[in-house]
Amino acid sequence: MAEFKSLRHFLWTLFLFTYTDFKTIVFPVTMFASIAAPVHVNGRLFYGILWTWVHLLQVDVSNQYKSIAEDLANRPWRPLPSGRISQRSATILRFLLVPTCVLASAPFGREVILSSLSLTALLVFHDEFGASRHWAGKNFINCLGYLSFQVGATQIMNTHSRLDYVAVQALVFNSLIILTTIHAQDFSDVPGDQALGRVTVPIYAPNTSRIFTLVALVVWSIFLGRLWNLGPIYHSLLCVLGMAVGWRFFRFRTPTEDAKSFIAYNAWLLFTNILPAQIRWGLLSF
């Protein structure tokens, strides 16, 4: 029983490392990949989800094992600030996850292995070389990291040797969406980022970043509806959602409200990830 309790404690600790990023990575990435591939085998869907989570774990442990001060301010329940795991153990786990992720990628070929290695390289620049301390480096690395997640998961779920035009187009535009809007995650983290000396987009341009977010979400919603040939009802829903989320970021500016707005942003982002379903199967024609 004691061993089971220890295992349960360990597994729950791993889950807590990744808990806040299920809505930002696991759900949208796997939803996107299952449509962009598209997935035909349930086993590949399951493995794509597992691959995404294991790589998310590597990312989150790497992000968190040196940023205890930030999490004490923003998320004190996480494994390190709450004392569930020591910094030494988190450091060991962080480096053990590198070969673990490569091994998890190996059965699916070179492209998936390269996606895994790309994520690891981006983590080194982000966490070890301090690229996350400036908004430009942070946003570009987030964009490329998100692309690595999507390419890896899509390649796993794809049963053909190459991704088709729809998948490639979706990957390109999703990357641009992340590049121009992912700073939405930083609004609620301003106190912790300031404590670490980071200069995120909301810190660099407090008011302009909120105006830009509103405009970007509306423009992307209009453009994506036309790109994917959405029906009028679905296109209207996408535009209304984008405008509502952007307005929330502009109007409500406390950390608590920004956290709620970020949840709404992830709903919008999830919507954008399913848009290729219109080209695949005509599911969004209304």
Image (cartoon, rainbow, N blue to C red):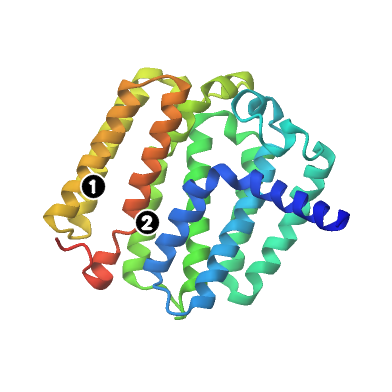
Q: Are marks 2 and 1 in contact (CB under 8 Å)?
A: no
Using the image, determine if residue 50 lies above or below residue 261: below
Q: Which residue is mark 1?
A: 238
| C-alpha gap between disc 2 and disc 1 | 19 Å
Residue in view at x 26 percent, y 44 percent? 220
Using the image, determine if residue 11 lies above or below residue 38: above
Q: Position of residue 206 (x, y in %)?
A: 40, 19
SS assignment at label 2: helix
Task: Decide if residue 275 is on the left or right side of residue 140.
Answer: left
Q: Which residue is mark 2?
A: 172
Quadrant where the N terminus is found in the figure: bottom right
SS assignment at label 1: helix
Residue at far front of view: 1
- Residue 54, quarter of the rendered image: bottom right
Q: Amino acid at mark 1?
A: Leu
Q: Position of residue 101 (x, y in %)?
A: 67, 61
Residue in view at x 33 percent, y 62 percent? 169
> How many residues crowd mark 2 within 10 Å: few (<14), some (14–19), many (20+)?
few
Residue in view at x 31 percent, y 35 percent? 245
Residue at far right of view: 2
Q: Nearer the viewer, residue 99 or 144?
A: 99
Tell me if I can see residue 123 in this picture.
no
In primary-sequence order, the first of circles 2 and 1 is 2
Using the image, determine if residue 7 lies above or below residue 75: below
